[in-house]
Image (spheres, rainbow, N blue to C red):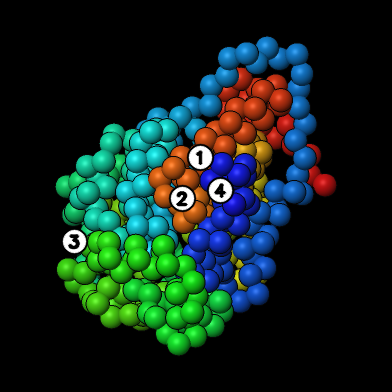
Amino acid sequence: MRLSDCHNIADFRRLAKQRLPWPVFDYIDGAADDELTKSRNTTAFDDVDLVPDVLAGVETIDTSLTVMGRKSALPLILSPTALQRVFHWQGERAVARAAQKFNLWFGISSLATVSIEEIGAMGDNPKMFQLYVHKDKGLNRSMIERCQAAKFDAIALTVDTIVGGKRERCLRSGFSSPPRFTPSSLLSYALKPRWALDYVFREKFALPNLDTHVSAGTGEAMSIQRYFTEMLDQSLDWKMAAQIREEWGGTFCLKGVMSVADARRAVEIGADAIMISNHGGRQLDGSRAPFDQVREIADAVGGQIEIICDGGVRRGTHVLKAMASGATCASGGRLYLYALAAAGQPGVERAITILKEEIERDMKLMGVTSVDQLTRERLRWR
């Protein structure tokens, strides 16, 4: 299978599976426990039908919108994800360049493998930093100050990782950060020599936003589940979130909000946006899908705060359904991670192009010329 054979996100997933050692692929693809929530994140969109209008004069359409104060060419954010240079040697650099080319929001994780400073200097498209609150307060302060200096447009405080979810695929494979060559996984790495050579001989693995303060995950191999449980601050609460917002002083988003009550609290502390998210199904299995929660959260706080539907997006129609339900826009991680793992920057650009074309085509087939015309009247729930 080649990159030119990829015509949807599922195709990129198949190509990534061909090219990655199985522990690395399972880290991207896997989720918590029985992975019910991960599956539901995408299948939730199947429960709603689109109702198109015709004869709407759709020769010219506008897919752009303003999100968190910045213009985006598409109603789609490339969500922050960790450890990207493990999946492909280009890592966050490839995704950042693709986001710049298409003028999209792009986020990097606290566990990114490229520094805040380097990403901040790449292009003028909007950028967010996903902040994990560590027990080390000096580390938290350092990351916020570095984002300020690098002129990031927003911080997304992740609030759903108080402990690490039980990622059983990773437990079976022994996947860690940095990856370890264990007896059970050695054959898998050996069977993917292109990946192995890139990992061994290219730029040394690092977590440059953390390694000034902690060795875990960079110098010391550790599972992500153990990292979250041991390194992150379990005392994180609404008072601390408000303090972080004040310390940051810029556009502030809460990533991992799922309930109406928490959405209201986000408004109360002055957050600019929330990402309705269950961490890709990698934390609380059995949690609702983000799309399932958009309507009731939009009914409660719509107009008071921007609402980003994060997770499960695989098609342009998913983006349109999220927005018609009441979301400001949609976002996702696996939708570009599979493409990054499959083919680096060309893969990410092809994945974005496919989604862009789907959004444009689907808007025309829906009879809408701008994204603000996507309203509840255009949906029917089964």
Amino acid type, mark 2: Ala
- Determine whether, in the image, residue 250 is placed left or right of residue 170: left
* Camera-nearest residue between 161 and 261: 161
Q: Earlier in the sequence, mark 3 or mark 4?
A: 4
Task: Indicate the position of residue 360 as horizontal and vertical percent values.
Answer: 60, 27
Q: Earlier in the sequence, mark 1 or mark 2?
A: 2
Q: Earlier in the sequence, mark 3 or mark 2?
A: 3
Identify the residue at the far bottom of this view.
183
Local packing at callout 1 (Cα closer than 10 Å; few below 14, some 14-19, many 20+) is many
Q: CA distance from mark 3 to mark 2?
A: 33 Å
* Camera-nearest residue between 25 and 305: 25
Residue occupied by mark 2: 343
Residue occupied by mark 4: 2
Element at badge 4? loop
Q: Nearer the viewer, mark 2 or mark 4?
A: 4
Element at badge 2? helix
Element at badge 3? helix
* Camera-nearest residue between 154 and 273: 154
Q: Earlier in the sequence, mark 2 or mark 4?
A: 4
Residue occupied by mark 3: 142
Q: Which mark is residue 350?
A: 1
- Determine whether, in the image, residue 25 is placed left or right of residue 325: left
Q: Residue at x 22, y 49 (%)?
A: 118
Element at badge 1? helix
Amino acid type, mark 3: Ser
Task: Indicate the position of residue 238 as horizontal and vertical percent values.
Answer: 39, 63
